[in-house]
Each structure stands twice: as C-alpha cells, then as structure tokens.
Image: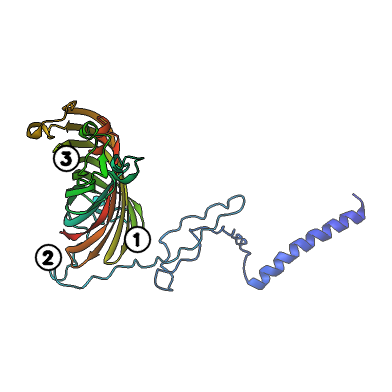
Amino acid sequence: MPANSRAFHLTFVAIGLLIPAISWAQGGGSLPPPDPVPVAAPASPANMPPVPYPGTTQPAAPPISQGPAAAPPIGPVYQTPPTYPQQPVYVQPPVYGPPVYGQPVYAPPPAYVQPQEAAPDSTICLPADAPHWMVSAEALWLERSDDRDVILGQTVTNNGGPSFVVDQLTSGDELFPLATGVKFQLGYRINDRDAIELTYFGLQQWSVGRTINGDPIGDSVLAFSPWTQTDGLIGGFDNSLGYTYGSRLNNVEINERFGGSGGMTWSVAGLWGLRYVQVSDKFNLSGADTATGDFENIDIKTANNLLGPQVGFQIIRDWRRFQLNSELKAGIFANFNSESYSNLNSSGAISGNPPGFVPINQRNSSTGVAGVFEISIIGRYQLTQHLWIRGGWSNYFLAGLALGPRQLGGFSHNGGISLDGPSLGLEAAW
C-alpha cells in the first residue's frame, strides 16, 4: 500500500474512535443501544379513535386488550365509516276514551281489523253499509199500442150509384189508454256485490172499442167487413159494425244484481235472471142489421206465456239524498201461445143464420220465439233513514205475440206491442 493511502486510512479510523469516546465522556457512562424506531400501524377499527357513546360526547372506555398490531396490508385500507346514533322509535300515544268492558281503564282498546271480505269498494252497486232488505210498492200506469192495425170494415153509400166510403174501422183507431196497475219489488243483499231481487207488475185491464153506423131508416149507408159472412149474404149491415178489445198483463221476474265499476258518485251494475210474462187478449167484432134481424159476432181469445232468461245493466248516479237509476233489460223467450176463434154467437137460434152461413169454432196453439226489451228511468229521494219515495218512467216492447185482431186472417203469433207510462210509490230498506 502506498504511504499516503495508509496514512489516510489510519486517520479515518482514529476519527471513528474519537467520536464515541467524546459522547461517553459527556454522558458519564457507557453508550446504551439505540431505541428501535416504532412502525406506524395502519388505520383499522382496532386502533381508531374511540366512538362517543350514543347520546353523549364522551369517548367510551378503551378495550382491555387490543392485542399486537396487525401487519400493514398491501394496498389501500378500507376505512369503516363512523356509527351514528340510532333515532328513538316513535310510539303512538294512547287513544283516550271510555274504558273497554273487561279491560283495565288504562288499557287502550284493541285495534279494529277490517275483514277482507267486507272491505269497502267504491265500484260496486251496493255500498258496504247498505241495508240488507228492500221492499217497494208502486202504482204503475201503462198505455198500450199495437205495432200494426187491422182493417175491420167500413161504411159506404147506398144510393143506387157508385158507392163512396163514409167511414172506416180499424183495430188501432184507439190506443189503449193509461190503465192503473201495481208494481212490487222485494230485494235481499247477499254481500257487498250481489243482491237477489223479485219483481211483479201487472193487473192492468185495458179496454177500447169503436162503432161505425149505417142508416137503418133509409138504408142510404151500409156497413161491410171483410171478416164477417152475414153482411155479404144479406147485402150489408144497415145498423152498425163495431169492435171491443180488452187486454191484460202480468209480469214476474227474479234477478241477481252484481256490482260493476264506477266512481264516488256513480256506478254501473249488471243483472241476469229469469222472467215470465203473460199477455192475454179478448177481441170481438160484431155487425147488426135491423131490416132482417140478423147479427154476427166473431169472438177471439188469445193467451201468451213467455218464459226465458234475460240480462241487463244499470247506471246509478247519486246526489246525496237523491239517486237516479237508468236500466236496460233484454231477453229471448219461449212463447207458449194459443187462440180460440168462434162465430157461433150469431143469429143462430134467434132468427136463424142466413143461408150459406158457415159456423166456425176452432182452437190453435204453438210454441214460438218471443222477445222482451225494457228501458226505465227511476228516481229515488230519501225521506228518512229507512224510507224513500220513488217514481219514474218505463217502456216495454214485446214481440212474437198472438194478438186478438191478428187472428182474423188465420192463426198468427208474430205481433208486437209497446207499453209505456209513469210509476210512483214508496220504498223501505233496513
């Protein structure tokens, strides 16, 4: 080693020995080993600052033992968010009121649980708190008209020249005027959506008639009919030709009404059921002659018994104490009809029928198809909690009937009638 390098090395070693010696001399003793440098532990739930106790701001007591510090993980460390105090649960205050029988005074009454099947529904025809029974009685005025007139005869001049028509007689000369009948209803609500209803109306006794007159003194006017025989055999009725027409109606039906859809003040309901309708006619066409004493009567009776299903719907509108119902019904029915036709109540045993007169006494029956169509508007006003006044207007159309005048041309069951009129009565519900 060169001399200068050796000298440099020795000088470095001497400086290294001199520095510890100076430190020892200042501290008065030997040099202790240096303290280890602590390694900072990563943030974790174990060494995070203590969380204040809920409801206070003071830290909770430290854990008894935290154990050795965990080794620092590799990568970013998940910081657990601080826990916030839980809000107190709101308790419903007790409902004050009279004590419940069988419970302490301070005990709140049990909560009422609405049954599932009795839940209110604004879309049904009958509200949940509606009465279970309903009965009504009304006076029902109906007038009747036939769909087609039958020409029964006419009076003509008899002066040796051309004949001129003086008057004509048809079966529809007079509408059946308003006749009073009754209408009864009995209903029972099964549940909030269904009700059974029994209805009857009828007892109307319609009767119309008209006569055209001849000239029994001077024979200047004579009456003829295309349906009688005597006038053709004696040269016309010099006295009169006329008719009488009576009719009667009965209706019975049982229906189930069921709730549909609607809103707060209106609703739509459906209906289906069975219906029986009876329509009977009694018709008489007669002519009389004063000069010969002959007369002729044609007596006709018909009966219609309609039976079958029907469907319908109802629209209901409420204004507090007043309610308006609009209803439509329709059905196809079997009509068990019959007719009797006779001219035996003529001159006969009194003065003897004129030569060539043919007695007739026949009966016919059949089963046909008939239809019934009904539309009505009924208003109801509540007088008391259980009593209503009701009134309205109804129209009924019946087709496929055997009618009295239609039998003059042969047995027929394809007639139609229309009935319409007002009604007024009371309704009780409980």
Return the residue found at the far left: 349
Classify mark 2: residues with Cα within 10 Å, few (<14), some (14-19) or many (20+): few
Q: Which quadrant is home to the C terminus? A: bottom left
User: Which residue lies under the disc numbered 2?
Assistant: 103
User: Which residue lies under the disc numbered 1?
Assistant: 264
Mark nearer the viewer, 2 or 1:
1
Image x and y of residue 229, in percent: 22, 31
Instruction: Give the numbered dot on residue 97.
Output: none
Secondary structure of the residue carrying tag 1 is loop
Image x and y of residue 274, in percent: 22, 39
User: Which residue lies under the disc numbered 3?
Assistant: 291
- Relative to residue 348, is residue 314 drawn left or right? right
Upstream in sequence: badge 3 or badge 1: 1
Mark nearer the viewer, 3 or 2:
3
Secondary structure of the residue carrying tag 3 is loop
Classify mark 1: residues with Cα within 10 Å, few (<14), some (14-19) or many (20+): few
